Structures are given as C-alpha cells and as structure tokens.
Image (cartoon, grey):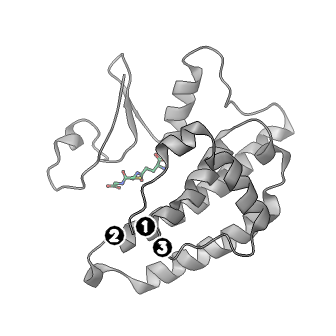
Amino acid sequence: MRTGGRHERLANSPYYGINPSGRVPYLMRDDGVGLEESAVICAWLDHLDGKPAFDFPAGHQAWEARRLEALARSMLDGLSVWSREIARPQDERSPTVIRHEADRSRRMADLWEAEIDHPFMRGALNLAQITLACALGLEARIPDFRWRPGHPRLSDWFGHIAARPSFAATAPPAHH
Ligand SMILES: N[C@@H](CCC(=O)N[C@@H](CS)C(=O)NCC(=O)O)C(=O)O
C-alpha cells in the first residue's frame, strides 16, 4: 500500500498516470486499486484491522456526525482555496477571492465557537474533529487567518487536539 507524497502541479507530471485527477492524498491499495478523497482513505485505513473507530454512530446521531463533518470540510475547503491563492505569484492573486475566503473563515470560526461543545466534538476522536483541526492548523500557512481572538473555547479545543502526538508529528510547516 502506498500513499501519494509530495505533489507537484506540473503540466505533464508523471503522477497523472497514477491518479489522473492529480490530487493528493491518494492511496494505492495492495490490490492495485487507487483511492482518492481523504474521508474515503481514512475509512479504508480505519477498517484495515476490522475494528473501525470512525464509522458514523447509529440513529439520529449519524446526522449530527454528518452535519458537523460537512461544516468542518466546508471550512477546510475555503481555507484551501485561500492558501492556494496566496501561493500564486503576486500578480496572479485575486483580491476578490482572498477577501471572500477571509470573510468565510471568520463566519466559520464564529460558527465553530458556538458548536465546539457539541458532544460529538468533545467525545472520542472522529473525522469531524480531525477535519476541523486540519482547518484551524492552517494558521501556520495563511498569515492572515487569525481565528483565535474572540474564540476562546475553540482555541482551548484546538490546544488539546494539536497536542496529540499524531497532530504534532504532522503539523503543517509555517511558510512565513
Ligand atoms: N477533498 C479532497 C481535497 C484534495 C485536494 O484538493 N488536495 C490538494 C492538495 S491539499 C491537491 O491535490 N491539489 C492539487 C490540484 O488540485 O491540482 C480530499 O480531502 O482529499
């Protein structure tokens, strides 16, 4: 089993022969079938030992899990657009896109300050928690993404999850 590593956005990258979408992460299963999309790859890895920990809970709670996971992904997707935009050469950056994503990130930080005490966000580790932590951790890559002021509960929550050995070992390197 292999996962896609460093990714170059090149016109004729040999990586496109492996994964035509060109996106990472990408997991090549031992049977030769490749999987993309973080949630799909996480589910696959989580099921490898026959004791999955990240499956949705039963009943109505499954909708809460889906709802929160979608909100976390929404924040992360917006931040990905922002971080990609500021990585472009200065004269190719769109101030409109950057402003739109900065505004979105502020609304989402407010939303999460209100949602962060939800039992699903405070209980056993799950994909909604991981996704939100990845989003908030992008403060290391996006200098103007300053979500902590005015969001004490979210800051406290992030402090705990960021201290997990797995998060500490894979924190995004600061670009500034
Ligand atoms: N929702 C997807 C997002 C994947 C994604 O957009 N990956 C970025 C890097 S973080 C990428 O490969 N971008 C390169 C491209 O779009 O060409 C996931 O979670 O796997």
Q: Residue at x 84, y 54 (%)?
A: 117
Q: At 77% across and 66% down in the image, what residue appears?
A: 152
Q: Which mark is residue 87?
A: 2
- Real-space CA distance between mark 1 and mark 3, rounded to the nearest whole angstrom: 9 Å
Looking at the picture, tell me which residue is in the foreground, 21 or 118: 118
Residue 161 locus on image (x, y percent): 67, 46
Tell me the number on the disc at residue 83: 1
The answer to whether residue 64 shows anywhere in this view is no
Dividing the picture into quadrants, the one containing residue 86 is bottom left
Instruction: Answer above or below: position of 32 versus 82.
Output: above
- Tag shown at residue 143: 3
Q: Quadrant of the N terminus?
A: top left
- Where is residue 41? Give x, y as percent: 49, 33
On residue 141, the disc is: none
Tell me if label 1 and label 2 are in contact, CB under 8 Å. yes
User: Mark 1, mark 3: which one is toward the viewer?
Assistant: 3
On the image, the x and y values in percent for residue 12 come to 14, 50
